[in-house]
Image (cartoon, rainbow, N blue to C red):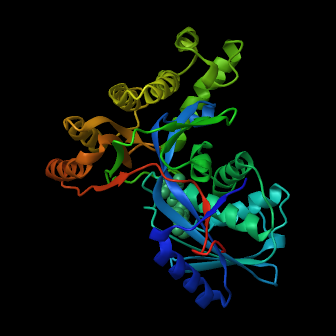
Amino acid sequence: MQFQTKWVPEMKIEREQALLMHRQRFGRAGKIFAAPARVNLIGEHTDYTGGFVMPMAIDFKTVAVVSAREDGRAVFYSANYNEDVELEIDSLERAPGGGWSDYPVGVVWSLRQEGVAVGGFNLSLTGDVPLGAGLSSSASVEVVTAMALLSHAGMDLPLERVATLCRRAENEYVGAKSGIMDQFASAGCVANRMMLLDCRSLAYEQLPLPVAERVVICNSMVKHAVATGEYGDRSSEVEAGQAVLQRERPGVKLLRDATLEDLEACRDLMSAASFKRCRHVITENRRVMEARKALLAGDMDRFGALMVEAHVSFRDDFAASCEEVDVLVAIAMQQEECFGARITGGGFGGCTVNVVRAEAAERFVATVRREYSGKTGIDADCFVCKPADGAFALAKNDGGY
Ligand code: ADP
Ligand code: MG
């Protein structure tokens, strides 16, 4: 894909600091790239069964600087962990070590599977994406690493392949179950647009968010753990239900193809848990398509109502919310400037996403923080966001690297 190269005045200092850090550490000037975090507006746990999602990129980024080395080695440094990890590229095998470097190393492994010859390099990472908050710092690391290393290899791949190879790094190298949404959004989103992505065909559409609206993310500060936690259990329950539907209902290749009637017909053939998880996914896919219509019609009341329905389905059928997150949603929905609120991300904590009138966004944040702290004793981090651009190379103001 042709990643855009752009000069971002707000990132002038970050850019200079990242380049300086790289030069001091590795004695070489490097090229610099950025990939954003994302938030999903609606369409939760639909991606790995070929359904629909509606993410947008947000203004938190992981930045990577890459430079060449002549000894065939890969050296990774993360400023967030203040640690480096080194390996010989030609003898790289699938051997995750359990730490942060599995993400970028997994991308090297995945690129090699894709036939990209990666020569020796230094790669330094830094960024402001909150880690493990459900905003997909993991995908931003994967995508920025892939971009940097493709540039290093003098190669270009289409968006679909970049996202797919990054997902493979996360699923098969790191060993975390996840769909294609995060990587696709981090690589392909566009400023001022939500992305509607069909996770089976990878067809996508960029939809407008009215300029008078903001997306507010509220972090419950309750930690989820994708690699080891219940995300795995939930997706297994969904996949078990999907397997029954595939077997029993002709035409159902993925859960995405199933209707509620199909599911009802198979109720006794699957566990009660699988039934409910699948019901969430089937109704959620419908809600995403309804949300698309609402956006195109500029009907934010309808969009917000769909978010709330999605939250209820996630809480009751998917059984993957938690008390603190439900409190956050309830507080949000009492504010008249808020159109809709729901949990976002894998579940069991993490963040809520809220669509709020722009001029009242700061007031909304102040109220939510105050009331949430009063009810739970926890200080929530809240971010007022607009849809941002996906991954890009950071230009100097004269247009070069
Ligand atoms: P999320 O994607 O919601 O932030 P994950 O658990 O999927 O949570 O991914 C977080 C992990 O990604 C971190 O624990 C770390 O291993 C890796 N990671 C994210 N950002 C960085 C970074 N800047 N440097 C190194 N590793 C990172
Ligand atoms: Mg992640």
Residue 365 position within the rendered picture, expressed as x and y whole percent measured from the top left: 24, 51
Examine the rendered structure and indicate whether residue 365 appears above or below residue 242: below
Residue 39 position within the rendered picture, expressed as x and y whole percent measured from the top left: 46, 47
Q: Residue furthest left?
A: 374
Observer able to see residue 288: yes
Q: Quadrant of the C terminus?
A: bottom right
Examine the rendered structure and indicate whether residue 288 appears above or below residue 135: above
- Residue occupying the point 34% across, 55% down: 383
Direction from residue 87 to residue 378 in the image, left or right: left
Observer able to see residue 95: no
Q: Quadrant of residue 342?
A: top left
Q: Which residue lies furthest to the front in this view?
A: 398
Q: Quadrant of residue 308?
A: top left
Could you say which is closer to the camera, residue 246 or residue 103? 103
- Residue occupying the point 26% across, 37% down: 338
Could you say which is closer to the camera, residue 55 or residue 389? 389
- Residue occupying the point 20% across, 35% down: 336
Q: How many marks?
A: 0
Examine the rendered structure and indicate whether residue 131 appears above or below residue 251: below
Examine the rendered structure and indicate whether residue 331 appears above or below residue 89: above
- Residue occupying the point 16% across, 52% down: 370
Residue 2 position within the rendered picture, expressed as x and y whole percent measured from the top left: 72, 55
Could you say which is closer to the camera, residue 81 or residue 16? 16
Residue 145 position within the rendered picture, expressed as x and y whole percent measured from the top left: 65, 65
